Image (cartoon, rainbow, N blue to C red):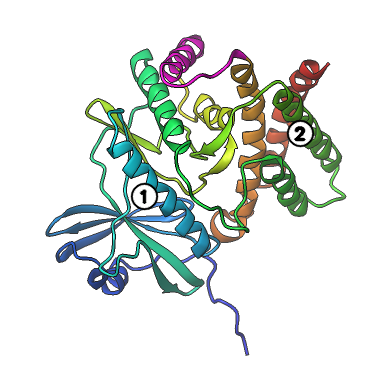
Amino acid sequence: MYTKPIAVRSVLSPNYLTYCLEKEYNIGEWLACVYLLKGLNDTYQVRTTSGLYILRLYRTEVRESDVDYELSVLVQLADILGGSKVSTGVSKPIYKQDNGLYSAINAPEGQRMAVLFEYVSGEEKMLQDAESCFAFGKSAAQLHAAMDRITVERPANRYQLDTTCLIDESLGRIVQYIGEAHPHTSFLRKYGAALKAGIEHAAEQGLGWGMCHGDMHGNNNAFLVGDHYVHYDFEWTSPGWRAYDLAQVKARKRQPAEEKRQELWDALMAGYRTVRSFSKHEELSVDLFIAVRRLWVMSLDVAFIPSDAGVLDYGDDWLNAYIDEFRTRISTIRSELD
């Protein structure tokens, strides 16, 4: 008899979610629940008689302890930022009638955690001009400053954004996928070792460490509401190097024209430094953390092949593109170590 899950990733019916969750909240009658976005998790827009909300349905790999940790961080951040005069906010989770913040939903692939968030009706800035980059840099620093004040106990099985998580575990997933005997495996191991050596060298000279957003790439993780940014999507929040958080912004997908990139990065750094210090040494380490982030993104591709993407687009062309990129980066990393 087959006893394992019959699906690896399902899209749950909005009607089913309404049935499961409507009575859990005191937000009025649910008038509509619309499937909005398939990402690492599934996002729905909920309209009730009291307004709009965002429903996030986490994939099965996200544990209850992870969701509880993320929401604990968010609740404290909302209190800290709401009680200050800074121009930064976060999208808050909505309390249920039992004062809980999440629900467990049965799905064909197993249990999935569901969280309802307040709806942020702002503008998604593309960070293509100096003004928006300065404002985002300032907001990122205000977020980091608030994160310095939170006190949330990290679960024993929760990662930190350190070299073990970002490099060792990423490399392990990639090698497991392509195989230990693959011709590129030896280079990938050397590349990982070079990244670790680079971070250790940079850390010896001083790198700021603290709670990070974890996915602060400046595109779909913040909205401009009036004159301030509201941040959301804290799934990857954990202690780490602040330079890693900012590297994600510098390496964002929606890049400005080549000739404007340095100007806009300087504007973002200027905004950040109006709130928090960020040394020139830390700024120089950002490109190293971009290289680390790219290895992590490659491993994320691998992690989602079985449940989301399939193997077709993740063969030799995909692998060789990363290898070519990493070969270019490794020479720069080694020259900085010499």
- Earlier along the polypeptide chain: callout 2 or callout 1? 1
Please check the rendered image and state whether residue 277 is part of the magenta-colored stretch, yes or no.
Answer: yes
Q: Residue at x 55, y 36 (%)?
A: 210
Q: Mark 2 points at which residue?
A: 196
Stretch of the chain drawn in magenta: 257-280
Q: Which residue is drawn at 63% across and 35% down?
A: 294
Q: What amino acid type is highlighted by mark number 1?
A: Val
- Outermost residue on the bottom side: it is 1
Residue 95 picture location, percent across and down: 29, 60
Q: Please state which of residues 126 and 209 is positioned toward the viewer in this rendering.
A: 209
* Residue 151 left/right relative to 23: right
Q: Mark 1 points at which residue?
A: 75
Disc 1 is placed on an element classified as helix
Gap between marks 2 and 1, in whole Å? Answer: 34 Å
Q: Main secondary structure of the magenta part?
A: helix
Q: In which quarter of the image is residue 188?
A: top right
* Residue 301 left/right relative to 337: left
Quadrant in which the C terminus appears: top right
Q: Which residue is drawn at 63% across and 90% down?
A: 1
Q: What amino acid type is highlighted by mark number 2?
A: Lys
| 158 up-or-down from 138: above or below | below
**Dot in front, 2 or 1:** 1
Is the C-beta separation of discs 2 and 1 under 8 Å?
A: no
| 318 up-or-down from 203: above or below | below
Please check the rendered image and state whether residue 320 is part of the magenta-colored stretch, yes or no.
Answer: no
Residue 47 seen in the figure: yes
Question: Tag 1: Cα neighbours inside 10 Å, few (<14), some, or many (≥20)?
Answer: some
| 279 up-or-down from 181: above or below | above
